[in-house]
Image (cartoon, rainbow, N blue to C red):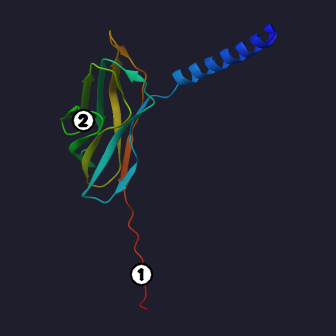
Amino acid sequence: MRPQKLRIIFGFLTMVISIMLVVNTTRSQSISLLPAKTSFPCQAVSFPIVASGFPSLTYIDLTLYIEIDPNVLTYTGYTNGTLIPTVGIYGNNIIGVTWTWASTFTLSGTLLTLNFTYHGGYDTLHFYSCSLNAGNPPAPVSVTYSDGLIGRCRRRFTTSTGP
């Protein structure tokens, strides 16, 4: 092969590898309460906390605080997902989730599911004062947090006539 063709091929491969590295390092890392829900009053509702877009991390320290309106929702517990966290309720409107891990782990899928009794009305389950640190020494990891929503179902009544 001619040196000029080799330079062109090498330049093209270098460009492709550079693009792949940029695409791989700019993926969106998010933790979300999904999906938005509607329910009838006095029903049990669950909100999975879902993570996506994270690479493998080591020495992880995750802290989530989620604010709820106690007139709309009452926290009843949680179900483990890929994490076995420590979960607590502070006052009657703040849910705290903490989890630490020293080995390599990829945050993905349903981390855990928060369970509630729904009383009616509308509420945003709001993430605030959250942090994710990883590495040794620990460093903050950039995360996008997406709040959850709950609202009341609208019941439709229909009338029908006999056969």
Measured as percent of width and height from the top left, residue 122 is found at: 35, 50
Q: In which quarter of the image is residue 130?
A: top left
Classify residue 104 as left or right of residue 90.
right
Measured as percent of width and height from the top left, residue 85 is found at: 23, 31
Give the vertical position of 136 relative to 129 (above or below). Answer: above
Give the vertical position of 47 relative to 15 (above or below). Answer: below
Q: Quadrant of residue 157?
A: bottom left
* Residue 71 appears in the picture as rendered: no
Measured as percent of width and height from the top left, residue 39 is found at: 33, 57
**Which label belongs to residue 159?**
1
Residue at the extreme front of the image, as rendered: 1
Give the vertical position of 55 relative to 48 (above or below). Answer: above
**Which label belongs to residue 74?**
none
Q: Which amino acid does label 2 sit on?
A: Ile
Classify residue 52 as left or right of residue 5.
left
Report the residue marked by disc 2.
94
Local SS, label 1: loop
Q: Give neighbour class at mark 2: few <14, some 14-19, many 20+ (Cα, 10 Å).
A: many
Of residues 94 and 110, which is closer to you in this image?
Answer: 110
Q: Are marks 1 and 2 in contact (CB under 8 Å)?
A: no
Quarter of the figure that contains the C terminus: bottom left
Measured as percent of width and height from the top left, residue 113 is found at: 29, 42
Q: Which amino acid does label 1 sit on?
A: Thr
Name the residue: 39% across, 23% down: 56
